[in-house]
Image: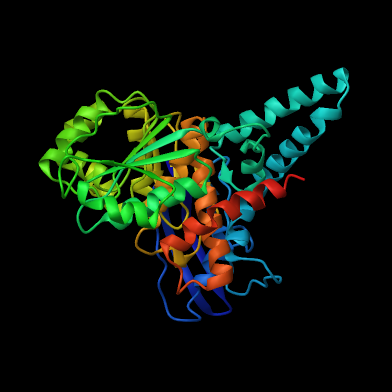
């Protein structure tokens, strides 16, 4: 499918010809780089193909319904406006529709029965349009309505029990960070199953968490579930030894609770690809780029990786959290949610272990996997942003992100008042 057709483009200034009989097609998925010295006509070309300047000769034709965002080198940005704000102006009509949809939702509580019918019809039309364009961005206004406030006369078991298989000799810190993040994100009970040697470390660094020792001193060999847990997470720092991979394979076939797989759990599966077919429906996997490519093959670009994530999510009926600058949450339906929180300071060891703990906490509290992922990803990034505000990006650590998780949740809930 051709996105852009340029036929016999000719343009110049005075006696100077800049383009002479240029023709090409841009197909869907292709990219073009325009290289040249200053003053050779690159900006002129972009002004022509975006319709800001008429060529002397030739035809410029975009495919139907294609919208173009272009950041001109002479653009004047107002204070607080980012490059992303300029580029997304190509989709401003969708953002306006989203704003209208949120306004309708806010007014439903006070609408009369007659108004309700009209509003619901309009709401459905807008929702269908946004769905057709896969237009979903994770931000505060989407997350706040999903969060449940704590109620009086409740106890720790009302907020769920999370079981985390994490850690091995030399990697017990991963278990600590996952456990602390889960506790800071509201899980009522957190149990860490790890190698026996991790007992003192875990009980000292995360005393609120319970410790379930494996029979092995150095790594996990057993992932049987002995108690009633509302969420199970596997992966941070567990290594890829054969006994650990065997235990994971057995868990995949017998896990009774919502499941999240991260880090070395994904590396174990990459070594035994047949385990992908054992993933329970709606399993959450949280790979970074390297882990994703080990699982599903090397990807040539971020666009190709996202397309593959959509395909794999559908094929295996799993939720993929593709971690990166704009983390993408991919659902089996094909919908993709892009997260807007986070900062470069979060490119630090253990940040993924903290994300595992946060998402697992929301699973334990009874949120379904689709909601737990978008909530967890947003809070993880917001906690990192809040920590960076106080500590700076250079000194930010994964433990800081965990420490700020509760404050991030509080900020979101406070915004609803």
Is the image coloured rainbow, by chain, by secondary structure, or in one colour?
Answer: rainbow
Q: Nearer the viewer, residue 125 or 241?
A: 241
State the image coordinates of residue 374 (x, y, percent, origin top left).
Answer: 52, 41
Q: Nearer the viewer, residue 37 or 17?
A: 37
Q: For the N terminus, which image quadrant?
A: top left
Does any portion of residue 300 appear in the rendered image? no
Does any portion of residue 129 appear in the rendered image? yes
Residue 347 placement: quadrant:
bottom left
Residue 270 drawn above or below residue 77: above
State the image coordinates of residue 118 (x, y, percent, origin top left).
Answer: 81, 22
Residue 276 placement: quadrant:
top left
Residue 190 drawn above or below residue 333: below
Q: Is residue 114 left or right of residue 62?
A: right
Residue 36 drawn above or below residue 226: below
Residue 260 placement: quadrant:
top left
Residue for point 19% across, 35% down: 222
State the image coordinates of residue 354 (x, y, percent, origin top left).
Answer: 42, 52
Q: Is residue 148 left or right of residue 307?
A: right
- Give the total number of marks visible in the rendering: 0
Q: For the C terminus, which image quadrant?
A: top right
Residue for point 78% across, 36% down: 106
């Amino acid at each position: 499918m051709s996105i852009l057709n340029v036929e016999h483009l000719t343009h110049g200034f005075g006696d100077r010809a800049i383009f002479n009989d240029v023709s090409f097609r841009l197909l869907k998925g292709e990219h073009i780089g325009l290289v040249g010295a200053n003053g050779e006509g690159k900006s002129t070309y972009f002004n022509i193909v975006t319709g800001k300047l008429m060529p002397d000769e030739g035809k410029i034709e975009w495919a139907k319904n294609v919208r173009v965002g272009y950041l001109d080198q002479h653009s004047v940005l107002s204070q607080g406006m980012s490059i992303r704000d300029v580029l997304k102006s190509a989709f401003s009509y969708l953002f306006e529709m989203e704003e209208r949809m949120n306004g309708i939702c806010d007014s439903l509580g006070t609408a009369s029965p007659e108004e309700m019918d009209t509003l619901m019809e309009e709401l459905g039309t807008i929702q269908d349009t946004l769905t057709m364009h896969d237009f979903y961005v994770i931000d505060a206004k989407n997350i706040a309505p999903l969060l449940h406030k704590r109620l009086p006369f409740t106890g720790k078991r009302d907020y769920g029990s999370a079981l985390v298989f994490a850690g091995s000799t030399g990697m017990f810190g991963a278990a600590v960070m996952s456990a602390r993040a889960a506790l800071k994100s509201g899980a009522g009970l957190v149990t860490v199953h790890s190698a026996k040697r991790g007992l003192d470390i875990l009980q000292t660094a995360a005393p609120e968490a319970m410790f379930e020792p494996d029979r092995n001193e150095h790594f996990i060999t057993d992932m049987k579930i002995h108690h009633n847990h509302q969420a199970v997470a596997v992966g941070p720092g567990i290594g890829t030894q054969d006994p650990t991979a065997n235990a994971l394979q057995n868990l995949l076939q017998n896990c009774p609770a919502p499941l999240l797989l991260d880090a070395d759990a994904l590396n174990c599966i990459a070594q035994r690809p047949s385990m992908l077919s054992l993933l329970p429906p709606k399993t959450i996997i949280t790979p970074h780029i390297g882990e994703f490519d080990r699982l599903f093959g090397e990807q040539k670009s971020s666009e190709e990786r996202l397309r593959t994530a959509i395909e794999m999510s559908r094929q295996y009926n799993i939720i993929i959290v593709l971690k990166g600058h704009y983390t993408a949450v991919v659902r089996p339906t094909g919908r993709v949610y892009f997260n807007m929180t986070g900062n470069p300071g979060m490119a630090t060891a253990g940040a993924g272990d903290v994300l595992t703990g946060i998402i697992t906490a929301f699973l334990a509290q009874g949120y379904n996997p689709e909601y737990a992922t978008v909530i967890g990803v947003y809070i993880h990034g917001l906690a990192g942003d809040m920590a960076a505000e106080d500590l700076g990006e250079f000194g930010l650590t994964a433990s800081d992100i965990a420490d700020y998780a509760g404050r991030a949740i509080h900020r979101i809930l406070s915004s609803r008042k």
